[in-house]
């Protein structure tokens, strides 16, 4: 019996910060057990340097990434699409699940710079950890299910 690898597409507007952070954090804890992608509804031109710096502090890496648009073929074959933040709006094909993580925005409380990114990172990391445990639970239950 072959069990397909779960797939997740993380989406934000610019694909320079939040969705890239989520993808890097998931890669960091899941390794190759989950197919992970990220994209933007209106991709920017570069990765947010403070986002990358805050991830490096916890051993995750997004330094080699570039913002990219949503690939319709990829969108059509992922299991789960996670939008991060309030602005990213997306229709997903039937068969894919859509979730939104309304992530923290510390700048609304006057927190900026690397402190802002650390708070965003920690918020996203908590969501990613929960999702990873959920995916792992599904894998484990599928592995022990009788044929």
Image (spheres, rainbow, N blue to C red):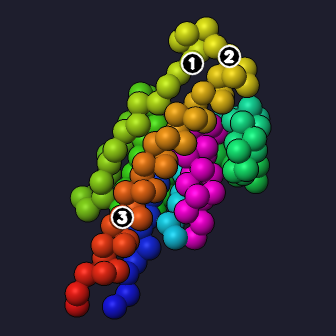
In space, the residues marked 1 and 3 are separated at their CA atoms by: 32 Å
Q: Which residues are magenta?
A: 10-32
- Please give left or right for residue 17 compared with residue 147 in the image: right
- Please give left or right for residue 19 compared with residue 5 in the image: right
Residue drawn 39% across and 62% down? 135
Q: Which mark is residue 114?
A: none
**Residue with the mark numbered 1:** 106
Q: Earlier in the sequence, mark 2 or mark 3?
A: 2
**Residue with the mark numbered 3:** 137
Residue drawn 63% across and 57% down? 28
From this view, report whether residue 123 is shown above or below residue 71: above
Estimate the x, y position of residue 38 in percent, counting from the top left: 54, 51
Callout 3: SS: helix
- Please give left or right for residue 85 compared with residue 53 in the image: left
Nearer to us: label 1 or label 3: 3
**Residue with the mark numbered 2:** 112
From this view, report whether residue 104 is shown above or below residue 107: below
Callout 2: SS: loop
């Amino acid at each position: 019996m072959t069990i397909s690898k779960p797939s997740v597409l993380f989406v934000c507007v610019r694909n320079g910060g939040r969705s890239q952070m989520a993808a890097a954090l998931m890669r960091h804890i899941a390794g190759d057990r989950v197919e992970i992608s990220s994209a933007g509804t209106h991709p920017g031109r570069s990765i947010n340097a403070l986002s990358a710096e805050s991830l490096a502090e916890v051993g995750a890496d997004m330094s080699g990434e570039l913002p990219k648009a949503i690939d319709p073929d990829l969108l059509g074959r992922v299991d789960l699409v996670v939008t991060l933040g309030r602005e990213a709006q997306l229709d997903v094909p039937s068969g894919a699940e859509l979730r939104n993580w309304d992530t923290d925005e510390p700048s609304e409380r006057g927190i900026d710079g690397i402190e802002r990114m650390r708070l965003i990172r920690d918020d996203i990391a908590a969501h990613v950890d929960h999702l990873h445990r959920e995916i792992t639970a599904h894998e484990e239950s599928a592995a022990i299910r009788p044929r």
